[in-house]
Image (cartoon, rainbow, N blue to C red):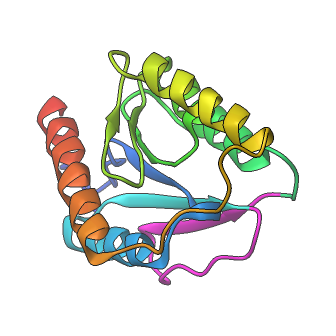
């Protein structure tokens, strides 16, 4: 249900939740959709592949062209200060934090000015270690515990944002 003012015109949502959906695990996507429905949040999933979202004015799926960082560029261009972005991409998070966007990673960590430089340095080190073959293999399968940790982090960021008005 969309809120309206006294003249009956719709009141725009105060913020949008953006999901960098290319690497978003299915349990996180399901959680976000359920939460958006319950809280009446505007949510946009951005991906370079076709992604399905519920047929509702609350949800939008944006499919960008294939290519390095195309989805990231779309998110940076279209977010506004106060929006929330869910991403695992630390360079993207660094750009968004600088634009006063609230950023949460898939581990449920709130990325902000006080911790983004350290996260970026660790990411760059890990990339170097992978490139030299010192670290191999991918992430472990997504667990129920990780989903709960993400849910708690999302609730913290969402509560903060809602208190801002």
Occupied quadrant, residue 138: bottom right
Occupied quadrant, residue 146: bottom left
Taking depth in this image into account, of 85 and 136 the one nearest to the observer is 136
Instruction: Tell me the chief SS of the magenta region.
Output: loop
Q: Position of residue 155 (x, y in %)?
A: 18, 53
Tell me which residue sits at (47%, 83%) in the image: 54
Quadrant the N terminus occupies: bottom left
Q: Is residue 56 visible?
A: yes
Q: Position of residue 154 (x, y in %)?
A: 26, 52
Q: In the displayed structure, would residue 90 be above or below residue 34? A: above
Magenta range: 48-64
Tell me which residue sits at (44%, 20%) in the image: 118
Spot the residue most to the front: 134
Q: Say if the magenta span includes residue 21.
A: no
Tell me which residue sits at (87%, 58%) in the image: 66
Q: Is residue 79 left or right of residue 7?
A: right
Tell me which residue sits at (18%, 34%) in the image: 165
Taking depth in this image into account, of 2 and 19 the one nearest to the observer is 19
Occupied quadrant, residue 69: top right
Q: Is residue 3 visible?
A: no
Q: In the displayed structure, would residue 24 be above or below residue 163? A: below
Q: In the displayed structure, would residue 31 be above or below residue 163? A: below
Q: Position of residue 113 (x, y in %)?
A: 37, 16
Q: In the displayed structure, would residue 144 be above or below residue 118? A: below
Q: Say if the magenta span includes residue 63.
A: yes
């Amino acid at each position: 249900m969309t809120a309206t003012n006294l003249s009956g015109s719709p009141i725009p949502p105060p913020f949008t939740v953006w999901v960098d959906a290319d690497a978003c695990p299915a349990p996180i996507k399901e959680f976000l959709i359920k939460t958006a429905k319950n809280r009446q949040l505007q949510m946009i999933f951005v991906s370079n592949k076709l992604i399905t979202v519920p047929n509702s004015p609350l949800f939008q799926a944006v499919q960008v062209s294939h290519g390095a960082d195309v989805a990231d560029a779309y998110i940076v261009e279209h977010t506004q200060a106060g929006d929330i972005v869910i991403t695992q991409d630390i360079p993207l998070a660094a750009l968004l934090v600088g634009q006063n966007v609230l950023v949460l990673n898939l581990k449920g960590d709130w990325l902000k000015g006080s911790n983004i430089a350290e996260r970026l340095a660790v990411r760059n080190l890990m990339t170097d270690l992978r490139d030299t073959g010192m670290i191999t293999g991918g992430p472990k399968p997504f667990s129920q515990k990780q989903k709960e940790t993400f849910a708690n982090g999302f609730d913290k960021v969402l509560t903060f944002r809602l208190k801002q008005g």
